[in-house]
């Protein structure tokens, strides 16, 4: 389970870094709230 969790976290971090992180989160948050 720990291995799977680490892999999942690594993938998420990689995606966030590649996309830019904060801008994506802000846009998604606004989209959901709206």
Image (tube, rainbow, N blue to C red):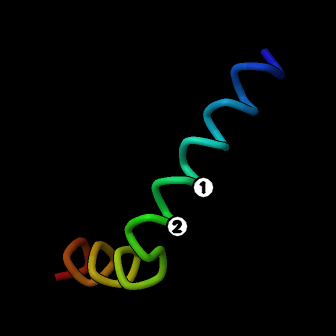
CA–CA distance in space, label 1 to label 2: 6 Å
Give the left or right position of residue 11, taking residue 4 as reference: left
- Label 2, on which residue? 17
Which element carries disc 1, helix, strand or loop? helix
Q: Find residue 7 and report its horizontal and vertical position in percent.
A: 67, 30
Give the left or right position of residue 28, taking residue 31 as reference: right
Report the residue at 78% width, 15% height from top: 1
Which element carries disc 2, helix, strand or loop? helix
Q: Find residue 24 and report its horizontal and vertical position in percent.
A: 35, 75
Report the residue at 38% width, 68% height from top: 19
Check the image and report above or below for 22 versus 4.
below
Are discs 1 and 2 less than 8 Å apart at CB?
yes
Check the image and report above or below for 15 versus 3.
below
Q: Find residue 28 and report its horizontal and vertical position in percent.
A: 29, 72
What is the crowding at mark 2: few (fewer than 14 residues within 10 Å), some, or many (at least 20)? few
Front residue of this view, candidates 2 and 31:
2
- Label 1, on which residue? 13
Report the residue at 52% width, 67% height from top: 17
Total number of numbered labels?
A: 2
- As drawn, the residue found furthest toward the front would be 18
Give the left or right position of residue 24, taking residue 21 as reference: left
- As drawn, the residue found furthest toward the right would be 2
């Amino acid at each position: 389970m720990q291995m799977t969790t680490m892999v999942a976290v690594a993938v998420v971090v990689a995606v966030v870094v590649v996309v830019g992180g904060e801008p994506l989160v802000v846009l998604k948050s606004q989209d959901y709230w709206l």
